[in-house]
Image: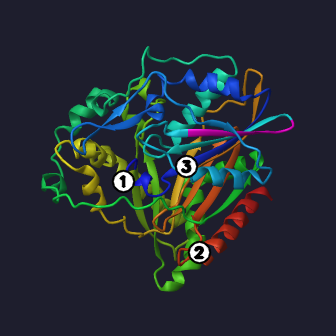
Amino acid sequence: MLFFGRQFPLNFGVKCAIEGPFNGREGERALRALVSRHAVLFSHQEYTQGKQMDMVFPENPPIILKEVFDTGPWADVLLSRMTFEFNPFTGPLFSLDWRRTPKGAELFFVFQHGAADGIAATWFIHDFLTVLGGGQVDAPASPNMPTLYEALKEEVTAELLTRPEPDWKKEDPPPPKPFDMPPYTVPDFFLRFFTLSPAGTARLASEAKAAGQTVNSFLGARVLKASADIFASEGNATRTFQCPVDFRQYLKEKYRSVNGVYNGIVKVPVDCSQDLAVIAETIRAGVLAQREGMKDIEEYFHFRDSFDNVADPESLMMGFPPDPMDYDFSFSNLGRTVLAPSYGPFVLQDFYGPVFTAVNGETVIGLNTTNGSLRMSLIFDKKIDKAAGYLQLGNRIQEIFTSFED
């Protein structure tokens, strides 16, 4: 993701509003206090031998922090920041823009997805607000990033080492092909947000529990059914539900809140001509089946050393085609966040994100539940063929949210 992020924005953004006396000087102080704890966000790459690279973790890295004076809607400000071109050879791999409000500030965090996933970013923001509010967080004496073997529980590593490597791991990589790095290209994104009140969120959670479903499967079934109503006119009522799954259950406790990318993807085909209850159960059971027996982390584990003996990994990466778009959208559910209602003198007013840039024709739905309120985003490139259909899907999502507010 660091490599392809040099060609288009492989980023995600988070907006949160706080009430309290925020200023840039205190913001930088809080960020620098997190250099050792969240070292990968402050890191950069360096060439070692040929095209091989290492990650470097400086003790005094550069910081991208600036005040913005754009008076437009906050969603437009966030979107304009999400397309930032990070330089992996200088770092850092995140940025923080902020603007003043009558009672505090709006904070616009953007992360290069190669350095963080949504859960890691939320922990980082929690730690940032903790330090900003006068609290402390645990951190090692100097910046470092654990290897996968260090981060995984010993019993997980021992078990995965007994499993055979997949066939693709035994194949020789293709010969390197010289290439010119394509110019950095920013898609023309459509972005829409949705908010469910604490009362509506409680009703959604209650109905999901009564149906024996998770919020992910219960709400996901409704959105997937709505998508099928729009796109199944193509003649295929079987749609594919895609969502990330978190691997932190396999990590040692002390590494679960440290930045990095610890998630994979699962896909579940669903016959959307069925009732919503059946669709929800198909999603729930399908995700569980792919996680059973640690099957979900096997591929991630095998990928750990895929570039160790590749002389030119950049040319190798250019040879991979984009992943097939065999799903309507990616349903990225962060779940309930770790954020507190307040941090010292600062009160958290809202939290939207993570909002992932949708590249290579993808459409992404992101959601989180923070302090009782569920918030969702829909993003896609306006130039994709099905853009008009996804505009309709946004209207259907709003109808779904409204139904839980009645």
Which segment did they paint magenta? 95-102
Dots 1 and 2: beta carbons under 8 Å?
A: no
Q: Disc 1 vs disc 2: which is toward the camera? A: 2
Q: Position of residue 258 (x, y in %)?
A: 46, 29
- In the image, taking residue 383 as reference, residue 88 lies left or right, namely left
Residue 213 shows in this picture: no
Q: Which residue is mark 3?
A: 12
Q: Residues within 10 Å of mark 3 (few under 14, many from 20)?
A: many
Q: Main secondary structure of the magenta part?
A: strand
- Label 3 sits on what residue type? Phe
- In the image, taking residue 404 as reference, residue 88 lies left or right, namely left
Q: Position of residue 21 (x, y in %)?
A: 79, 26
Dots 3 and 2: beta carbons under 8 Å?
A: no
Mark linked to residue 387: 2
Q: Which residue is mark 1?
A: 289
Depth check: 111 or 146 in front? 111
Name the residue at 67% across, 27% down.
27
Name the residue at 51% across, 50% down.
85
Spatial CA distance of label 1 from label 2 is: 32 Å
Asked which secondary structure carries label 3, the reply is strand
Q: Quadrant of the C terminus?
A: bottom right
Q: Position of residue 273 (x, y in %)?
A: 52, 77
Which comes before the other along the chain, label 3 or label 1?
3
Taking the magenta stretch, the answer to whether it contains residue 242 is no
Depth check: 239 or 329 in front? 329
